[in-house]
Image: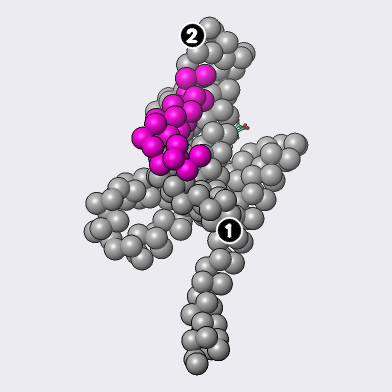
Amino acid sequence: MRKFLASKWAKVVVFVLSLGPLLFLMWRAVQGDLTANPVEFLNHQTGDWALRFLVFTLCITPFRKIFDLPELIRFRRMLGLFAFFYVCLHFLTYLGPDQNFDLKGMWKDVAKIPYITVGFTAFVLLIPLAITSTAGWIRRLGGKRWQALHRAVYACAALGAVHYYWRVKSDIRKPVFYGALVAILLVWRMGTRLLKKRAPVVARTSPVQTS
Ligand code: HEM
């Protein structure tokens, strides 16, 4: 498993799997099978996949630690960029067929409709994260500042879940499920950070260190 995860093929497999939802939608489009309301269908599918990819990205760190698979880090950037890619498609299905690329109309919605305000905020927050996801930007910003900036991905995922929750009219199970996943991942991350901060104090006061 580890050998495979460290190989270049693993990245190819993850890339192709991540393109799967897009290929599936393209296949359905070619078949003329995008339901009676293709725009709504595409908007919902791309929104769902954007949120899923945000959750996949957030799962990388806990999975690395829990399953002792440090190699998983190789896929985090790619999954994050796929989340951004599906958000862009989702946004375009709204701005294009829904708003006829009318930016004024879009701003009206952003200002008036709470679920659009929240979705748009998450989208805007993701832009600097996508831009600074390269090794060059890690060097330029420095590891600590880069990490602090990229913690905003938790906010994006949480806003994505709230956006979904406010959109649905009756069945709230799916947005609540995503919201709970994001909350668990955030609590896990905060817990491990707290333990890490306290670790040197414990080490300093431990008999092994002081003797
Ligand atoms: C991180 C950013 C975003 C995420 C994760 C996200 C996710 C979602 C999800 C999961 C849905 C529901 C899909 C379903 O019902 O199966 C949705 C619906 C929708 N989103 Fe987003 N979204 C984001 C940003 C945006 C932005 C920027 C806009 C437009 C400015 C937008 C406009 C919409 C619209 C119009 C709907 C469908 C509403 C309806 O049919 O009633 N979203 N989004």
What residue is rendered at 58% in x and 58% in y?
186
Placement of 51 over or under 98, stated as above or below: below
**Label 1: few (<14), some (14–19) or many (≥20) C-alpha neighbours in 10 Å:** some
> The residue under label 2 is which amino acid type?
Val
Based on the picture, tell me whether residue 170 belongs to the magenta stretch. no
Residue picked out by circle 1: 186
Q: Is residue 64 visible?
A: yes
Q: Is residue 117 visible?
A: no
> The residue under label 1 is which amino acid type?
Leu
Query: Residue 81, how many percent across, how many down?
Result: 40, 40
Q: Report ligand 1 position as a quadrant.
A: top right
Placement of 87 over or under 201, stated as above or below: above
Query: Ligand 1 within 8 A of label 1's CB?
Result: no
Query: Ligand 1 within 8 A of label 2's CB?
Result: no
Residue 172 is drawn in which quadrant?
A: top right
Placement of 100 over or under 29, stated as above or below: below
- Secondary element under disc 1, as helix, strand or loop, is helix
What residue is rendered at 59% in x and 17% in y?
37
Placement of 108 over or under 61, stated as above or below: above
Seen from the viewer's position, the closer of residues 114 and 203 is 203
Residue picked out by circle 2: 30
Residue 101 is drawn in which quadrant?
A: top left
Residue that lies at the very extreme toward the right in this rendered image: 170
Q: Nearer the viewer, mark 2 or mark 1?
A: 1
Q: What kind of secondary structure does the magenta stretch mostly adopt?
A: helix
Seen from the viewer's position, the closer of residues 96 and 57 is 57
Relative horizontal placement of residue 139, taking residue 117 as reference (left or right): left
Query: Residue 130, how many percent across, how many down?
Result: 36, 45
Earlier residue among tags 2 and 1? 2
What residue is rendered at 50% in x and 13% in y?
27
Based on the picture, tell me whether residue 13 belongs to the magenta stretch. yes
What is the span of residues highlighted in magenta in the rendered image? 1-24
